[in-house]
Amino acid sequence: MEAQLLAPDGLRLFRRSWLPARPTRALLLVHGYAEHSGRYEQMAGWLAARDCAVHAYDHRGHGRSAGPRCHVGRFEEFLDDLDAMLDAVRMEQPELPVTLIGHSMGGLITLAFLAERAPAVASAVSSAAALSVGGVSPLRVLLARTVRRALPRLAIGSGLDPEGLSRDPDVVRRYLDDPLVHRTMTTSLGAELLAAAPRTAARAGQVGVPLLVLHGEADPICSVDGSRGFHAGLRAPGSALRTYPGLRHEIFNEPEREQIWQDLWTWLEELPA
């Protein structure tokens, strides 16, 4: 199912859902920088086959959503959008427990949302959360921070190597060929992410629901150390950390993807009702 969602500031966001006949839980996917919700089709179908109602949306400035490409004025706009999407899921399926699943930048957004806004969700999962970004050069960091004030919408190259996404060459090829993937970001988005990462990393103790922290140990884009540090600060019962030797940034798109999906599913099933 495809639909539109109005963000709190009136921006039009694209959303989609994979709905089984009799869902037992709802999952809300929060995608990463430069990509879009359509890249989660295979994973969402796998989870929907296990009676999960899977929902996803494209961030503002990403995929099929409106807004300048890969731009945000304030990081809080991402949190407002996630809040609106979560409200829509709750309205449509009020009887189902909701789990947030955030990858990379979406993982950072999810963790910030949990820590700062304490949403009424049952649990959450982060994948390669952008808490410690190792794939961005110091020059680009300096550029984003110094130029942002005068030229907040100036597009700069991200500098991220697509080979760092997955060991599966088909995944990398499809990423490079995808017309909805934009490999630039504005100076404002860069500066907001750089500010949000350490701020969020320091707030693990404020997460009030069980959190599964996932990360590939060979991730060259977002260091696994960020996830390890965040997990060490968690207090919510039922939280867990799973890291995967040799796996790169997009663990949900690695050759071992079904094992990762199964690990996620098993953790969800073992949580107390």
Image: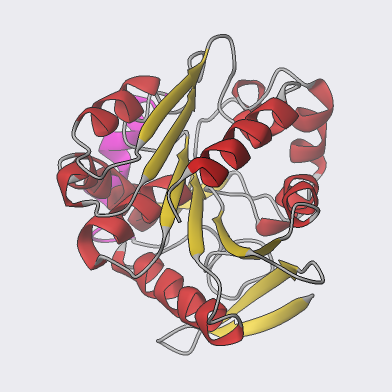
Residue furthest to the top:
246
Furthest-front residue in this view: 273
Name which residue lies at 71% across and 70% down: 16
The residue nearer to you, when weighing 238 against 114, is 238
Question: Horizontal and vertical percent for residue 66?
Answer: 59, 76
- The answer, for residue 246, to whether it is visible in the render is yes
| Magenta stretch: includes residue 140 | yes
Q: Quadrant of residue 176?
A: top right
Q: Quadrant of residue 252?
A: top right
Residue at image x 39%, y 38%? 130
In the picture, measured across the screen, residue 156 lies left or right of residue 52, that is left
Above or below, 57 against 93 in this view is above
State the quadrant of the C terminus.
bottom left
Task: Determine which quarter of the picture holds residue 83.
Answer: bottom left
Viewed as shown, does residue 206 lie left or right of 153?
left
Residue in front for this viewpoint, 164 or 205: 205
Q: Position of residue 207 (x, y in %)?
A: 24, 51
Q: Along the line of sight, which residue is nearer the eye, 98 or 16? A: 98
User: Magenta stretch containing residue 212, yes or no?
Assistant: no
User: Magenta part of the protein: which range?
Assistant: 135-151
- Residue 191 image offset from top left, x and y in percent: 29, 49
Q: Residue at x 59, y 37 (%)?
A: 266
User: In the image, residue 41 lies at what x, y percent?
Assistant: 78, 52
- Residue at image position (34%, 57%) is 188
Does 244 appear above or below 162? above
Location of the N terminus (image quadrant): bottom right
